[in-house]
Image (cartoon, helix red, strand yellow):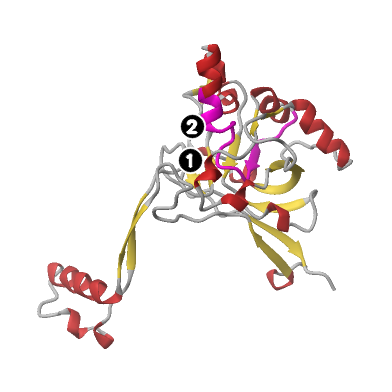
Amino acid sequence: MLSLSDVQVIDLSIGIEPGVPSEPWPPKVESLDHSEGATILAENLRATGTENVTAEDFPDEMGLAWETVQAITHTGTHLDAPWHYGPAVGDSPAKTIEEIPIEWCCGDAVVLDFTWKEAGTEITPEDLDAQLEALDHTLSAGEIVLIHTGSDELWGDPEYLMEFPGMSAPATKHLTRQGVRVIGTDAYGFDKPFTDMGQRYAETGDSEELWPAHLAGREVEYCQIEKMANLDSLPRQTNVPLVTTPVVIEGASAGWVRPVALFEEGP
């Protein structure tokens, strides 16, 4: 029987960092230290009827530290639910994050190399098939597909928001129609960058240039993980055991995740 003591764990996530230039809507984190915690906890105790307790009564005059986080659900590594893309998938109501079956988020993954793909371009069905063929791999229903662009190396810089290829709508549908429910990327976004989408829309006036891969989710049901990291640290590209379950937020369009890959340690 495999034990966690025999497992190598590889973290594939980016955290929540206040003020980082790689987030267009950076989170805010207010931290309370142990002394402030003692003051507030003492106030809470007095409010519940414990009289005469003060911050000085705590051991070393220190209570508990904690943080208040103000962030959108799409900050850091997160999993988008179908509700993010629209209110319905075909004729069915779109799932919110707490409705995502946990089985979708645990399973074997395949990592497809698109580090060669030019930033601002779109990944096509033919691109996907070529990478799968290079790996001699056939997708199976329920498998998770991870798109490796290498753009996570730019995390912390403004360029992170612009230097990556995105999925196309046909490519997204191509994977989901093979039974793929979860698709991840180590890029900031699933579609091509905002600047490229905006430029193409300005040139063509075609509304289908706006978030086409996301909006494919109005036709086919799937979830996407954005802002993954360290895909180049995996020891192999196929049969990658992955756990990427989201935080449950009632009625939300996304939930933060910390994807981890689990590998049996070698002898």
Q: Can you identify the residue that label 2 sits on? A: 84
Pick out the residue farthest to the top.
205
Q: Mark 1 or mark 2, which is nearer the start of the sequence? A: 2
Q: Amino acid at mark 2?
A: His
Query: What is the quadrant of residue 55 in the picture?
Result: bottom left
Q: Are marks 2 and 1 in contact (CB under 8 Å)?
A: yes
In depth, the one of 172 and 230 nearer the eye is: 230
* For residue 258, side relative to residue 124 (left or right): left
Q: Distance between the Cα atoms at labels 2 and 1?
A: 7 Å
The local secondary structure at tag 1 comes to strand
Question: Who's the residue at 75% across and 26% down the image?
Answer: 125
Q: Residues within 10 Å of mark 2 (few under 14, many from 20)?
A: many
Question: Who's the residue at 51% across and 38% down the image?
Answer: 99
In depth, the one of 43 and 98 nearer the eye is: 43
Mark identifier at residue 254? 1
Query: What is the quadrant of residue 178 in the picture?
Result: top right
